[in-house]
Image (tube, rainbow, N blue to C red):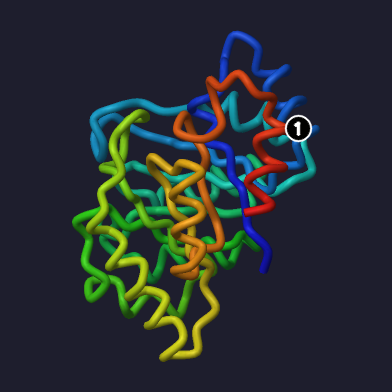
Amino acid sequence: MSMLLCPSMMCANFRSLEHEVNALEEANVDIYHIDIMDGRFVPNFGMGLQDLEYIRKQTQKTVDVHLMIDNPSAYIDLFADKGADIIYFHPESDMHPTRTIDRIVGRGVKAGIALNPGTAIAAVEPLLGMVDYVLVMTVNPGFAGQKYLPFVNDKIQALQAFKHEKGLNYTIVVDGAISEEKINELTHYGVEGFVLGTSSLFGKEESYKTIINRLKNI
């Protein structure tokens, strides 16, 4: 699989979301990443359903939702109905994560789990054979602009080793303070997907197209 570049739409300029999406389409990004927060599982609120609906209508590309919410199983049908192609949730926020994965897959949506920096791989090993994506948080979730936590590199390498040892097919995606230098480093660890925020894409003087083209050539 080629590198997946996934703009974190929480970092976009919401005064002109239409312009932002058009520029990202022109840049040929791979996946639109939409953070959904409830103010309980993480101490912040993310994007709304109207944002998801608007972005879904503007693109044929893959759209994912990252559910940083309590009891995500109650909302799987809602986000599937809104057109999400990938749904990530945090297993520790769910009483029955295997059932939630089954519900996602049953809706014809790709299933992903998101791992906080402090979540051990051993805690989610039974789930890894059931999912299409593993989203590794390289900062504590909920806020943009944090510093990359280097100890997470060991978890990424362990996930890659486990994947090969067990013959699994999940795609490893990283999210949090992902700079151009980190992309260059983490591709060597087997990371295939990168959520792009203010460290590499948004708020720069260069166009999205210029940045995305350079990143794709790393």
Residue nearer the viewer, 73 or 18: 18
Residue nearer the viewer, 68 or 144: 144
Q: Quadrant of the C terminus?
A: bottom right
Q: Is residue 93 left or right of residue 193?
A: left
Q: Quadrant of the N terminus?
A: bottom right
- Badge 1 crowding class, 10 Å Cα cut-off, few under 14, some 14 to 19, many 20 or more, is few
What residue sits 75% from the left and 36% below the top? 27
What residue sits 72% from the left and 17% below the top? 19
Occupied quadrant, residue 109: bottom right
Position in image of residue 169 (x %, y %): 55, 78
Residue marked by disc 1: 57
Position in image of residue 77 (x %, y %): 54, 49
Q: Secondary structure at mark 1?
A: helix
Q: Is residue 131 left or right of residue 120?
A: right
What residue sits 32% from the left and 58% below the top? 115
Position in image of residue 128 (x %, y %): 41, 75
What residue sits 72% from the left and 18% below the top? 18
